[in-house]
Image: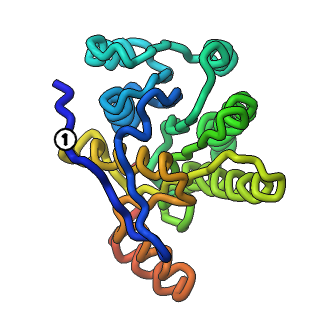
């Protein structure tokens, strides 16, 4: 069920050199993946298992996590923990250390005009942002000891203003601000912990072909292992709009509005 594609190596061009990724980079690494019961998070758990990592997976729905656990039950390299509370999770993690924290969970929001619901934004901030901060704080002592990595799964909605995603976009912009600033402080303090921000294009994991979440999950893992500053998936759907944002912001706004072709407000 979990067939591993037999590639021997992976290289990505950087400005001055080639970065190589090998699955063996993750062998024996201790990794926490949040939001791992479905979609990209689930696929990351499978990839990491094949690579020989020891993984703790979390999600808010234990039944879905049990399904993932069942698929991975034959992989002895997996160390599974069905935990929903941050404190309990990191108490367990402290017993065996931590090399990589992948923050991937996300709260549900609506796709519609902003309706003025401040409580919804507060709830979404708790899930999409403040819990990321809390888990980072809990993980930092272990990551500093191991010289580990923090991988933050974000979105184009955290870099560009899109209509109908106001609450969700606010939380993703907050992630960029917090982790980009924290990266600067780590550099000043000579803290050997990398931060990788993953900028994903809009992906409906429930409707698109299943290969896309698998491919996206692998790109996220590669970026974390190579300690890259940012990961863009898919590259042309994310990097080009960001270039337009910096050089022709009004044009990008116009193109975004044209893409939605709005004639009347979408249903809430």
Q: Residue at x 35, y 27 (%)?
A: 49
Callout 1 environment at 10 Å: few (<14), some (14 to 19), or many (20+)? few
Q: Is residue 125 visible?
A: no
Residue at the spot x=25%, y=47% of the render? 8
Task: Name the image quarter holding the N terminus.
Answer: top left
Coordinates of residue 118 in the picture (x, y in percent): 68, 44
Q: Residue at x 36, y 18 (%)?
A: 64
- Image coordinates of residue 164 in percent, x first then y, are 48, 58
Q: Nearer the viewer, residue 87 or 146?
A: 146
The percent position of residue 154, horizontal first and vertical second, equals 52, 51
Kindly indicate the quadrant of the structure image that contains residue 261.
bottom left
Local SS, label 1: loop
Residue 207 vertical placement versus 34 (above, below) = below
Vertical relation: 59 (above or below) 73 = below
Q: Where's residue 100, x and y in %?
A: 56, 36
One can see residue 91 in this view: yes
**Which one is in front, 144 or 176?**
144
Q: Which residue is mark 1?
A: 5
- In the image, 267: left or right of 96? left
Q: Nearer the viewer, residue 109 or 238?
A: 238
């Amino acid at each position: 069920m979990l067939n591993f594609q037999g590639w021997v190596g992976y290289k990505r061009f950087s400005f001055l050199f080639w970065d190589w990724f090998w699955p063996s980079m993750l062998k024996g690494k201790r990794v926490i993946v949040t939001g791992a019961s479905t979609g990209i998070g689930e696929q990351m758990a499978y990839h990491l298992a094949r690579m020989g990592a020891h993984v703790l997976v979390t999600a808010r729905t234990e039944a879905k996590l049990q399904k993932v656990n069942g698929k991975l039950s034959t992989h002895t390299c997996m160390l599974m923990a069905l935990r929903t509370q941050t404190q309990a999770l990191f108490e367990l993690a402290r017993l065996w250390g931590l090399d990589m924290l992948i923050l991937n969970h996300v709260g549900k929001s609506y796709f519609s005009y902003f309706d003025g619901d401040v409580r919804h934004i507060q709830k979404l901030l708790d899930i999409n942002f403040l819990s990321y901060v809390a888990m980072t704080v809990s993980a930092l002592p272990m990551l500093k000891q191991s010289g580990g990595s923090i991988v933050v799964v974000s979105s184009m909605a955290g870099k560009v203003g899109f209509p109908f995603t106001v609450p969700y976009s606010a939380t993703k912009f907050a992630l960029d601000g917090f982790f980009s600033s924290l990266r600067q402080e780590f550099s000043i303090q000579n803290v050997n912990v990398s931060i990788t921000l993953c900028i994903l294009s809009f992906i409906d994991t429930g409707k698109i072909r299943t290969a896309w979440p698998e491919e996206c999950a692998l790109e996220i893992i590669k970026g974390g292992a190579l300690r890259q500053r940012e990961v863009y998936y898919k590259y042309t759907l994310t990097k080009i709009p960001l270039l337009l944002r910096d050089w022709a912001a009004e044009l990008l706004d116009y193109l975004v509005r044209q893409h939605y072709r709005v004639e009347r407000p979408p249903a809430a």
